[in-house]
Amino acid sequence: MSNEQQVRIYNPTEEFKKNAAVSGMDAYRALCKEAEDDYEGYWARNARELLEWKKPFTQVLDESNSPFFKWFADGELNVSYNCLDRQVNAGLGDKVAIIFEADSGEVTKVTYKELLSRVSKFANALRGMGVKKGDRVVIYMPMSIEGVVAMQGCARIGATHSIVFGGFSAQALRDRIEDAGAVALITADGQHRGGKAMPLKPIADEALSLNGCDTIKNVIVAKRTGAATEMKAGRDVWFDDAVADQSDVCEPEWVSAEHPLFILYTSGSTGKPKGVQHSTGGYLLQAILSMKYTFDIKPDDVFWCTADIGWVTGHTYITYGPLACGTTEIVFEGVPTYPDAGRFWRMIQDHKVSVFYTAPTAIRSLIKAADNNPTVHPTKYDLSSLRILGSVGEPINPSAWEWYYENVGGSRCPIVDTFWQTETGAHMITPMPGATPLVPGSCTLPFPGVQVAVVDETGTEVPWGQGGILVVKRPWPAMIRTIWNDPDRFVKSYYPADFQGKLYLAGDGAIRDKDTGYFTITGRIDDVLNVSGHRMGTMEIESALVAHEKVAEAAVVGRPDDLTGEAIVAFVVLKGSRPTGEEAKAVIKELQTWVGHEIGPIAKPKDIRFGENLPKTRSGKIMRRLLRQLAKGEEITQDTSTLENPGILEQLKG
Ligand code: PRX
């Protein structure tokens, strides 16, 4: 990003700056300074201003049991109250909360008053089943109003929800139900995607038939597709029947700010997904503050985050952040390419979306579609309602950034490239749209109050211009509290001894521009892949592969991919002889289907190669660096003499 690279810088317009929540860099710096001078004071001020407390907190940050930090622990509040009752009490009852657009194009609008009523009824139904504060409820649902109602309903009664993405398999669902020890499962008969109806309840039934799910006492099933559905007497009930006779008044359960609002499973560098546990008060605080600062949210905005509620982005920027700000938001059931690749642009036009938040993968695929078919080009639509664009989930390449800026944003809308993670709960490094000069490909500077750094292996900050490890220096309110059922893994994964347990390890590499100090994320430094913005552990996929009866050994690596960011490449040793030709093709298909069934379609390796063995050192360690080079099709130039079996490399070339 130095001058010789001729990077273009995009400044906010004066017009935009004038009305922005963070107006100009001086305002941004003033917020950062406030937090630096009095860290707890900064967060406490915001927590008082932005949240409605039943019982005000007197403690701010409690570091006594580091790294199990607590925020506002003696304060009490309820998230659903803060999202819904608060708006109704403020006279926003008739404001539209959710504009739901189904895959078919059918639109349903729900006001804040109606949403409060629906959430209250659902919460009463859960209570009626005996679900209580602290119980875990797994939600396996499509993008739907019921999905949001289910999450908010859990929050209302203090039940901890755990959403499992609707694309995950029965086995993945089972693992999460068991680990969470869930008492109830909320699902749907099926889901619509791209004009097709797909089953959900049968997958849920398969999961429940496996060992480890007997903690589930109730299954609530929303009707989406109308598919013939088996209902198990005494266990299963239709969503509509469950809420039918319920009162629309439900006293919220007032919980400590530290009460676990949700657990969300995500991939780490070992095989088993981690149940990231989030809090109530600190989490909601940063959901709201980031809506205010990053998205500069205003009363008239129509906000659209295209994520699925199955991912953290859907939690913070669909279910909680927008509603807690009294925003009108879009919830979309379908896919960006159905009925054609102009779907997003048409929806922005129809609903007059003003803040649009999506992932680089979606942008890249829509660029390709628009190149092939000019009728779905964004410039063919009236996108004049847009004022801010967002990007999340993976690095956005500068060319995609520029296309997004020019063709979607009409060269007028700032792009906020937001870096954050399931564990961070909310944005960590991101531009402020009315302040930060933008540089394509950089997530720019820390969110006000968040203290990040780039360090070396010893935890010492490296000079700007030098790559290193991204860390967070101080605990922040929306941070992960622990890994459900595995506090040791929490400490080891995020507060490693290498940094004396004092720095949060994000798992990403980063570099700061030598002139501006802007951050660029250089990718994961662990065995985690990012495929289409979905996080996958290589070990998770390896475990799935070796669970197949034909597989003796497997190693999985990522390879850069123009469309999906990274693609999954698997190197496999079969128990029998190494297959070739048609036989190899058949086994590849079989293994892809298998992984799809074990984890979900998103985990299917794009490329599978067979060897009689894997490249290992003499001590038996798989040489992943070599595999990554082979996956990319690079010539192996390095010395391979330490390999136990150098001949194997030839077999593993693509
Ligand atoms: O590698 C980083 C990448 O996504 C990882 C977090 O994935 P997940 O927990 O699934 O959350 C995704 C949505 C918040 C990070 O460790 N990542 C996320 N946002 C960006 C990013 N990489 C570069 N730029 C981003 N803006």
Image: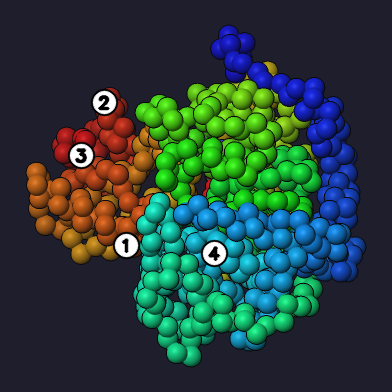
Could you tell me how far apart the alpha carbons at marks 1 and 3 are, in whole angstroms? Answer: 25 Å
**In the rendered image, which quarter is residue 200 located in?**
bottom left
Q: Residue at x 75, y 65 (%)?
A: 113
Q: Quadrant of the C terminus?
A: top left
Q: Position of residue 484 (x, y in %)?
A: 58, 67
Categorize mark 3 by other alpha carbons within 10 Å: few (<14), some (14-19), many (20+).
many
Helix, strand or loop for disc 4? strand
- Kind of residue at badge 4: Ile
Q: Quadrant of the N terminus?
A: top right
Q: Residue at x 75, y 39 (%)?
A: 296
Q: Position of residue 152 (x, y in %)?
A: 67, 67
Mark 1 lies on residue? 597
Label 1 or label 3, whichever comes before in sequence order? 1
Mark 3 lies on residue? 652
**CB atoms of marks 1 and 3 within 8 Å:** no
Mark 4 lies on residue? 163
Helix, strand or loop for disc 1? helix
Helix, strand or loop for disc 3? helix
Mark 2 lies on residue? 635
Q: Is residue 72 visible?
A: no
Could you tell me how far apart the alpha carbons at marks 1 and 2 are, in whole angstroms? Answer: 34 Å
Label 1 or label 2, whichever comes before in sequence order? 1
Label 2 or label 4, whichever comes before in sequence order? 4
Q: Is residue 426 visible?
A: yes
Label 3 or label 2, whichever comes before in sequence order? 2
